[in-house]
Image (tube, helix red, strand yellow):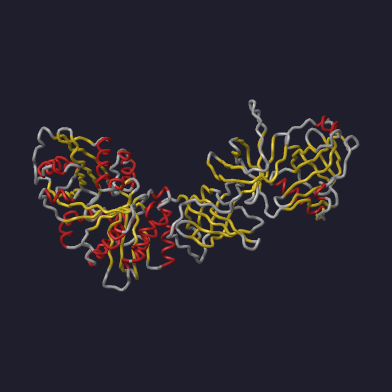
Amino acid sequence: MEERHSNTQMELIAGRPPENLKNKEWKEIRRERLINSLNRINFQDGDIVVNFRDLKYKTLVSIPAKPQPCLDHYFECKWSESIDIDYKVNHYRFENFYFTDGFKQILVEAKLITINQNGISFALPENAVVINSRKVRRFKCNNVSLQLFQNGLTFEGEMVNFSPVSFSVNIPNKISLNVQQEIKRDEPVDIVLIKDNSILFSGRCDIYRITDTLEGKNLILNPLHSKIQRFKSKEFRSVRQELNPSPNIIFNHPFTGSRVNLKINNISGSGFSVEESFDNSLLLPGMIIPELNIELVTGLELKCKSQGIYRTSQDGETVKCGFAFIDMSLKDQIKLSSFLHQASNKNAHVCTKINTDELWNFFFETGFVYPKKYFYIHSNRNKFDEVYKKLYEHETDIAVNFIYQDKGIIYGHMSMFRFYDKTWIINHHAADSSKRTKAGLVVLEQIGRYINEFHRLPSTKMRYVSCYFRPENKFPNLVFGGAARNSSEGCTVDQFAYMHLNKKQFNYDLPESWTLFPTSNDDLAELKNLYETKYGGLTLKALDVEPSKINHDEKINDEFLFYGFKRERLLFTLKDKGNLVAVFMICVSELGLNMSDLTNCFHVFILDPDRLPSKILYSTLTRLSSHYEHDNLSVLIFPKRYAETHSVPIDKTYNFWVLDVDKSSDEYFTHVKAN
């Protein structure tokens, strides 16, 4: 039979309040409510803390214990960890126990009945007292590790419990070699909170209290900042909308593991705000939520990664918290954009599934497909139609389209697709000018809004936005060309000569002094140096014609292939007597991805125009034309001046516009708004 010790061996001392609390009026709770609280702790597998007083030194030692189900005044607990009970009996006496529900700390001056190696039992009093009450509830944490930095020293530990205004962390004792490491109470600390190898919070805190324990130190930390800045501030911010019905956010709290479900106040493509009760608040500025679901309506959810940006309270009862999206899949971006754009304008659609026959009718009726363009594409019209069915009847991660449609009739269209590593190409902007719908402006505003809201997210892979347009086309020249003319450096235009070439049109051999080989990093570095010195634009960066991007095509090719599209890119260098003369970029893609086939053509960058006779240019193009299945090839030549000085017959001029959205999006939107 196990040995038991009675209260005759361990003297019960009435609980003595700390000196600074003696004059306070404590609130009492009755035994019935106390029992319910203890049973709740048992249900949640929590602990109470049992206090013992050292008989010799009068110091207090606290030991955690797990309460067992309680029916009446008799109350049993099991030790949460193994202890030397004989030593405790001989050197300590039981004083009281306490527990917390996150808000209140409740002190119970119970009568000791028995104590042994397994646990302890009490007779509960008629009343217990609330000795401390917080304004904001603290919640128990699960497996959250901590790194703490102060004055060049690093400490590791774990977070014990959490609230947005203060949290408790434990720093275990560690032996250091000849170095006295002390945490200074009156100086701030920087902390990093980590769970599952992911950083969930980093920030600066004040130390409210330091308590020495047998295992180390317990710190109560107060976060210093109620607002952070995740992204660079912008003049043109996202439009926050209040939706009806309002969506919900649902997630598992990264620190406590508890399920959170809150109603959204307002939302945009860059973030949202919610409200929660002050005393039960859980949201902390700087805290990262790795996976958060936004329930737009029942059955329609999207996932995102988000971070708390601010926390504010006006009345002390409600807390308003703002969150920023820090990543979201392209498919979910489209869902959110569609929902928000429809809420703003019922005729504005994002990637809606449409009848492609109606789209082709729209292109012909608006003159977007004009006779000369149709003459060029008519022999491949079935392939064009097949590509458009893939783009407009199925979801992809490589293309987004914006359509203004009223009562089933299309009045405006604009699209963009990602063809290079972090470059999206805008194309197919068309509108029915005979109707007073301003549909062309609506879809332009839609695509601008999408770019402004989502370009920062890693999944969007958008550093540059570009488009090809003819300088005589007034609208794109006003919008895109005007933006470049008014830009400081983050928006540029380069002119290309455009020509058609038949595979069988020329068949010149290259002279012996000329060589044609795959492009090397050194070749691209030389091209980059010349281009930046002479032209200073963004074309090479947008088209990935740079040394750092020479091996970036395989992943993009695979993404296109996944959705049933062809994409291939090759680079060749033409040299004369070892001197770099031109770089040829061969882009092979589906016919119709761009109506003028500008993503299924040659781009020729000429470094030494005076050294390149037109016959050598034609011969090189003919030798490389085997990469294309069709006979009629499209060729873009830069600089355009080469074609003019060498009497190369060109069909038209194309401007290639590039916007660095990280650097100059505000400049672009200022220009668009003014015009």
Among the 4 quarters of the image, the one containing residue 75: top right
Residue at (17% x, 52% y) in the render: 498
Residue 585, image x, y percentages? 23, 43
> Foreground residue, 416 or 335?
416
Residue 480 image offset from top left, x and y in percent: 29, 59
**Of residues 480 and 195, which is closer to you in this image?**
480
Q: Position of residue 261 (x, y in %)?
A: 57, 56
| Above/below status of 543 relative to 263 | above
Front residue of 515 and 7: 515
Q: How many marks?
A: 0
Picture quarter containing residue 212? top right
Furthest toward the top, the residue is: 177
| Quarter of the figure with residue 523 | top left
Residue depicted at 13% across the width and 51% down the height:
644
Q: Is residue 622 visible?
A: no
- Check the picture and name the quadrant holding the N terminus: top right
Residue 550 in the figure: left or right of residue 185 = left
Q: Quadrant of the C terminus?
A: bottom left
Relative placement, left or right, of 252 versus 458 is right
Residue at 72% in and 50% down: 101
> Residue 130: x and y, percent?
78, 52
Any part of residue 226 in sight: yes
Q: Residue at x 65, y 33 (%)?
A: 181
